[in-house]
Amino acid sequence: MDQTPRDIDPPAAVTRLDGVRPDKALRRTRLREFQAQLVERMQAAQTGTRLSASQLGVMIGQVRYLLDLREAGEIVSAGSMTKVPLTKDWYLGLSNIRGSLTSVVDLARFEGRDVTNVDNSCRVVAFAPSLSFNSGLLVSQVLGLRNAADMEEQLVSDNTDEHSYKPWMIKKYRDRDANIWVELSLAALIQNQDFLQVGL
């Protein structure tokens, strides 16, 4: 039996040959299976178990990012967020994640790009407890687990295609479909003084 970890992608809406979509119960079952696999892999990474697929792929705005599973915590629905007055436009407010108030940030806006539109596919990826920083990033979409070893590393320069280089952008990769991925260090992000200053 092949036990080599493979990329796990979220289930997509599937249409059968006769044009009928699977019922909602089947889609919910597939979603639960995907979530269970994702949680298992993230827990394994945080406890030090060796995995080849060691990054969580997310889309923030139009940019694909890779997050180290040891730095990423819970993934929850974007849901409702409580605005905090007199804060920067990239600071979206506070969200209740399992009884804990968590600051939510729009990284795309923080990096000087357009505001991330909040819709049903958006999620909040909380920072791992090991970072001791009670915050999370708004992501447009969770793309599943990825293995940077299967991608081609690209030169990170001051003039990247989609955005300017930032200190928290560790590496850049191109996958087999020519998509560009940026490896994001949450540990480096929380060291940035501008990121820590949310007030106007």
Image: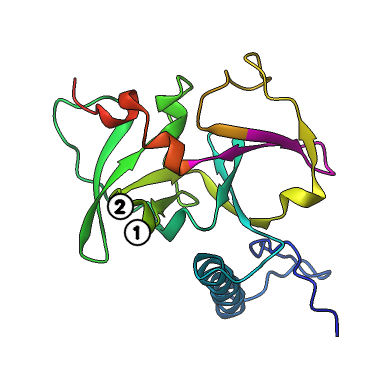
Residue toward you, 97 or 184? 184
Q: How many numbered markers are drawn?
A: 2
- Of all residues shown, which one is farthest toward the left? 85
What amino acid is found at the position of numbered circle 1 in the picture?
Pro
The quadrant of the picture occupied by the N terminus is: bottom right
Verify CB contact (< 8 Å) between mark 2 and mark 1.
Answer: yes
Whether residue 181 appears in magenta in the rendering, the answer is: yes
Magenta region? 171-185
Main SS of residues in magenta: strand
| Residue at 15% from the left image edge and 25% from the top image edge | 86
- Residue 62 makes an appearance in the image: no
On residue 132, the disc is 2
**Does the magenta portion include 104?**
no
Rendered-image quadrant of the C terminus: top left
Which residue bears the numbered disc 1? 129
Name the residue: 69% across, 64% down: 8
Q: CA distance from mark 2 to mark 1?
A: 5 Å
**142, 148: nearer the viewer:** 148
Question: Residue at position x 68%, y 20% from top?
Answer: 161
Residue 198 locus on image (x, y percent):
24, 28
Secondary structure, mark 2, is loop
